[in-house]
Image (cartoon, grey):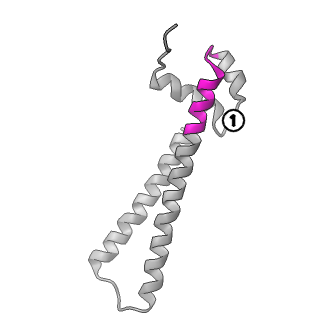
């Protein structure tokens, strides 16, 4: 028997059921949509890993921003270009948070 290929739309719809805020039981949802439990479990696991990886990257960005902030206290004021770069990183961090929220609850 061949391997079943699921559409991205189907995958997102099913993942919405087993991820927050719904957090339904993986086995129950897999049975409802007639798919193997192991497939849905694997999708959910990879989705959680991706979210955690994004959160770790965000923490690293914030740590770098904090380092920059501590160094600023001992140095002369930053140039407008550097301030703009910092602002852009902050915007990117916010975008990552928004994407995580949309991906989990969207």
Which residue carries the number 1 mark? 23
Q: Which residues are magenta?
A: 33-46
* Residue nearer the viewer, 16 or 68: 68
Residue at position x 62%, y 16% in the image: 33
Rendered location of residue 76, percent (x, y): 35, 92
Residue at position x 65%, y 32% in the image: 18
* Picture quadrant where residue 45 is located: top right
Rendered location of residue 31, percent (x, y): 68, 17
Rendered location of residue 89, percent (x, y): 39, 65
Q: Is residue 39 in the magenta section?
A: yes
53 w.r.t. 87: above or below: above
Q: Going by the image, does 46 lie left or right of 95? A: right
* Residue nearer the viewer, 39 or 106: 39
60 w.r.t. 12: above or below: below
Q: Is residue 17 in the magenta section?
A: no
Tag 1, which secondary structure?
A: loop
Q: Magenta: predominant secondary structure element?
A: helix
Disc 1 packing (10 Å; few <14; some 14–19; many ≥20): few
71 w.r.t. 98: above or below: below
Q: Going by the image, does 7 lie left or right of 30? A: left
Rendered location of residue 101, percent (x, y): 54, 46
């Amino acid at each position: 028997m061949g391997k079943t290929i699921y559409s991205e739309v189907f995958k997102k719809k099913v993942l919405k059921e087993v991820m927050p805020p719904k957090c339904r039981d993986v086995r129950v949802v897999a049975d409802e949509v007639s798919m193997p439990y192991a497939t849905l479990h694997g999708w959910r696991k990879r989705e959680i890993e991706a979210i955690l990886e994004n959160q770790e990257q965000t923490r690293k960005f914030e740590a770098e921003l904090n380092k920059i902030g501590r160094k600023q206290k001992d140095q002369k004021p930053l140039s407008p270009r550097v301030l703009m770069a910092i602002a852009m990183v902050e915007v990117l961090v916010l975008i990552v948070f928004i994407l995580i929220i949309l991906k989990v609850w969207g």
